[in-house]
Amino acid sequence: MATTAIWAVKSRLGHVLRYAEDKEKTANAEWSKVDYQSMRDVMDYAMNDAKTEKQYYVSGWNCSPMIAREEMQITKKQYGKEDGILAFHGYQSFKPGEVTPEIAHEIGLKLAQELWPDHQVIVATHLDKAHIHSHFVVNSVGLDGRKFNACKASYRQMRAVSDRLCKEYGLSVITEQQADVRKHYAEWAAEHAGEPTWRSIIREDMDTAIRYSMTNREFYNAMRKKGYTFEYRGSFLRVKAPGMKRFVRLRSLGDAYTEEAITRRILRHRYPESEPREPRKLKKYVRVQGDFRLSKITWKGLRALYFFYVRKLREAKSHPEQRYPFVLKEDLRHLDALSEQSKFLFRYKLDTEEQVQTLQKTLSEKLSDLQSERRELNNERRRTGTTEERKQEIEDRLKTLSDTNKQLRRDLKLCADVLLRSREIEEKKRILQEQAKLQKPTEKGKNKNARRRGYER
């Protein structure tokens, strides 16, 4: 059984202010103090070491947990949507003792992937309470530039997906009992005590009459023989049982006892309902002209440049028998490196050199912070008063920092490679386009001469 909720983060979060700000690590001229602190507050609360078992249960979707704030801010700046809601903070809470931390975190990650496939999300599972619960920090701006619309429909979808995942993992699901009509407390208490009421007696008699009737006339005749009286009050049909002082409206008995519902139930005896057939799927054929792969390109700048050049190199590699310009053959040995740089640009949505330089600066600052933390942990490990349990925690943390350090260094190298190679590729693209223009008139001239020779014959 899991409960869910989600709300917008617009300003500083009062319930997470106890997680103090580290001024040395949060100083960034690219962000305003309020915006940075708001985003930092909610992420610090979600990824708190004491709640997540030293961050063993923290994952990122479309982002890295170590640099999630920077990546989210880059996405906002890229589309010029830095105002308004900064992020969305949600949670998924499980029944105490029903789920393990590993399963809860796995369910939370699947929930984030299905609900926010194009958004950057931090998933952190907290273990500090009796009920294990996962927090979600969702960037308000998606990787496609669209803002997340948090409304009743989106929350209903969140609850439905959460319930489905709980069922898949064999967990209980909250069920809601909805009454057809509102009941007086005395009636409700009598029904729960197993005592008959006027309304329950009327329903039983109506069910019996419907069961043995094939038309509406037979139904009303059977009810009148039992002593019931029917009358219209305005547009509402009312009924009175023998011994009752007042009439009651049929609709007050429930949705299954209105005039229309009674007619439908009687007609089922004559025309049983069949299972609805699935609509027949029709195949659609569309004729397109040109290169269909290029029709969906919406990016510009560096991503478009690398996509063009890497595609040309792959065509040259797959068709070695054809003649290609020398600039392509020269770079065939660098195809793997250029392909990795292209994937890097698409991963961070980088289109200009300024964006690459901004990311490079952010990654360098993060790398410096990680190195400082590693030095502090190494010094603590060498101290004589450090317990074996603490040493093991330090070892695990150092291993995580080492993996993150490798990824940061790899991304920094890709930033430098892109800044170095992008201008060369731009020049080679210009050469290829000029050569293509020179070849077109030649081909037209050949066709024209061929037609001329054929006419003379």
Image: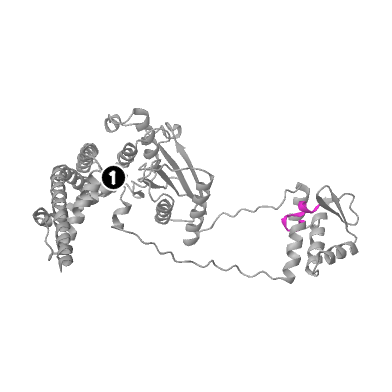
Judged left or right of residue 413, residue 73 is right
Q: For this rendering, which residue is in front, 273 or 89?
A: 273
Residue drawn at the location 29% of the way across and 42% of the way down: 67
Judged left or right of residue 232, residue 103 is left
Residue 205, position as x, y percentages in the image: 82, 63
- Say which element carries label 1: loop
| Identity, as a three-letter code, of the amino acid under mark 1 | Lys
User: Label 1: few (<14), some or many (≥20) within 10 Å?
Assistant: some
Quadrant into which the C terminus falls: bottom left
Judged left or right of residue 382, residue 107 is right
Residue 398, position as x, y percentages in the image: 23, 47
Judged left or right of residue 334, residue 157 is right
Which is the main secondary structure of the residues drawn in magenta?
helix
Residue drawn at the location 60% of the way across and 67% of the way down: 276
Residue linked to disc 1 = 349
What span is in magenta? 249-258
Whether residue 83 is visible to the viewer of this picture, yes or no, is: yes
Residue 324 belongs to magenta span: no
Quadrant in which residue 452 is drawn: bottom left
Residue 34, position as x, y percentages in the image: 37, 29
Q: For this rendering, which residue is in front, 162 or 327?
A: 327
Residue drawn at the location 47% of the way across and 66% of the way down: 282
Residue 148, position as x, y percentages in the image: 43, 43
Its colouring scheme is one colour
Total label count?
A: 1
Whether residue 398 is visible to the viewer of this picture, yes or no, is: no
